[in-house]
Image (cartoon, helix red, strand yellow):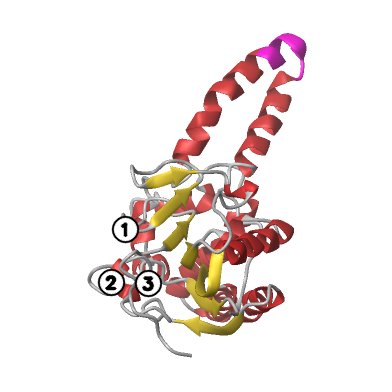
Amino acid sequence: MGHRQVDSKLEYLNLGCGYRFNSQWTNVNFVATGENVLPYDLNRGIPFTDNSFELVYHSHVLEHFSRTAASAFIAECCRVLRPGGILRVVVPDFEQIARLYLTSLEKAPKSTEWAANYEWMALEVLDQMVRNSRGGEMATYLAQEKICNQDFILERFGAEAEKSKSVNQNYSRLKSLSQPLKELKSKAYRLLPKSWSRFYTALKIGYFRQSGEVHQWMYDRYSLGKLLADHGLQDIVQRTASESYLDCWASFNLDTEPNGNIYKPDSLFMEAIKPS
């Protein structure tokens, strides 16, 4: 399993990039987040022809698809990837989350610090799957004036924990839904004067859960590796944030910060090769 030299044409694709992208890449996100970002609904596939890219990358995107949709999305990644090309997938590491949850469960009864860590780990396991409003209970936890286990959370989430206090990556998308919701609220009030509040609440929750913020599945090194293998990919390997088949991967500062810190320490990093 050799390494690749950086291609001067940078035929690399970053899917669901949010605000983290490289201007030399082709960057696609569900909504525009910069002048170098193509807005496109990835539920509809990937808007490029077969065999277009040397490398396809997405970080903390796959878990937002259902298992069926995730398989279709990986198939699309394989389609636009050239033979011999690299697919790099980053997701929350369910194995790491589960192990820390169990550790905190054992230690919580005897330690105030670990009791707080247990509360946070329970949120990591459940909140992003069950929440019905932006940010969920994680946002409420992070909004506390004093967080007694702040170092633990920063170690888990890195810079994302700080950003989560005031910024949500789905804000623009949710904001775009507000006007039709207001119009539907008005119509519901006229048509269903006795039950409009309940109807509107259900509608608002439904809109939110379709917004893309909620996690619909979780992956560990076995399940993600199996998913990649099921699509015919080879040389599947777990990576660190800075390791890759591609030389100088870390220089793009997608999984790492310029100072070398990991952008999302709670992540599982995996790569695979499309057969030639």
Residue 173 position, x and y percent, is: 50, 37
Q: Residue at x 44, y 59 (%)?
A: 14
**3D distance between C-alphas at marks 2 and 1:** 12 Å
Identify the residue at the far top of this view.
Answer: 190
Residue tagged 1: 24
Q: Position of residue 112 (x, y in %)?
A: 45, 72
Residue nearest the viewer, comparing 229 with 111: 229
Amino acid type indicated by mark 3: Glu
Q: Residue at x 57, y 42 (%)?
A: 133
Q: Residues within 10 Å of mark 2 (few under 14, many from 20)?
A: few
Mark nearest the camera among 2 and 1 is 1
The image's mark for residue 6 is: none
Per the rendering, the mark at residue 251 is 2
* Quadrant in which residue 95 is drawn: bottom right
Q: CA distance from mark 1 to mark 3?
A: 30 Å
Q: For the residue labelled by badge 2, is the local secondary structure a helix, a strand or a loop?
A: helix
Q: Which residue is mark 3?
A: 155
Give the magenta-colored segment's residue range. 187-195
Residue 57 placed where, x, y %? 48, 65
